[in-house]
Image: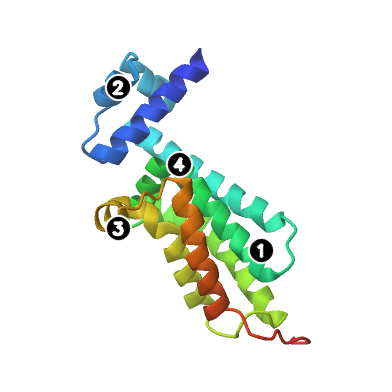
Amino acid sequence: MKGSTKEKMVDAAIRLFYTQGYDGTSVRDIASSANVNIALVSYYFGGKKALYEKILIQFLEGYLQTMHQAIRQQANSVQDSLLTVIRELLLYQATNHYTARMVHREMTLDSVLVREIMTTYLRKEKHDYEQIIKLGMKTGEFQRQSVDYVIIQIRTMVNMPYLTPHYFQELYQLSPKEPYFVERYMEHITRWVKAALCRSKPETGIA
């Protein structure tokens, strides 16, 4: 029962933080939405701030785990490996779209929490992308260019639909949380990878 009570509070908090923002959500709101005693928020999580941080960190840990599992999958080429990573990260965010927007929105702020997250989680994400891109360049499968700018472009494509879902819904009638969006979006991303990253004929023996 304890687990289900905590899960109800986390789920309620995620939805309220998503719709009302952190400052617009009170502990009483969370308890009321979860239909639990208000004291349980502090008892289980140590308060609203601690609950908010727990939700962010849990999402980022899952994000990195998804990325690492995708990297470990067998692939016929570096291009396929990169596309697998992108697809799995899109699906992860689609499944956790409320939390994804919370996290990406938080990352636009300058705070102690954001700096800690940058150091602990996003630096690891950057490192994983670097390894893939540099491997593709080393084998000659990818064109040589700025690795940093390539990562910025990829990361923007992967995360923007979940940072600004209303933009996609209102202007393009697209719902980033739906599987059909990920499949159609991946078709575009695949074309982009081929055009912007891949060589027409891979070179070999590049150190």
Mark 2 — residue?
33
Query: Which residue is denoted by mark 1 in the rendering?
Result: 81
* 31 with respect to 201 (left or right): left
Q: Quadrant of residue 47?
A: top left
Give the number of the mark in front: 3 or 2: 3
In the figure, is residue 103 to the left or right of 200? left
Judge from the rendering whether residue 83 lies leftward or rightward of residue 13; answer left or right.
right
**What whole-number distance in Å separates the C-alpha atoms at marks 4 and 3?**
21 Å
Image mark for residue 27: none
- Who comes first in sequence, dot 3 or dot 2? 2
Q: Position of residue 163 (x, y in %)?
A: 35, 54
Q: Which mark is residue 172?
A: 3
Residue 192 sits above or below residue 199 on the image: above
Whichever of labels 1 and 2 marks the residue nearer the N terminus, that label is 2
Instruction: Please determine whether, in this image, residue 190 is positioned above or below residue 118.
Output: below
Q: Amino acid at mark 4?
A: Asn
Residue 181 can be seen in this image: yes
The CA span between labels 1 and 3 is 29 Å
Q: Are marks 4 and 3 in contact (CB under 8 Å)?
A: no
Q: Nearer the viewer, mark 4 or mark 3?
A: 3
Say which element carries label 4: loop
Q: Residues within 10 Å of mark 2 (few under 14, many from 20)?
A: some
Q: Which residue is mark 4?
A: 96
Provide the secondary structure element on which disc 2 rests: helix
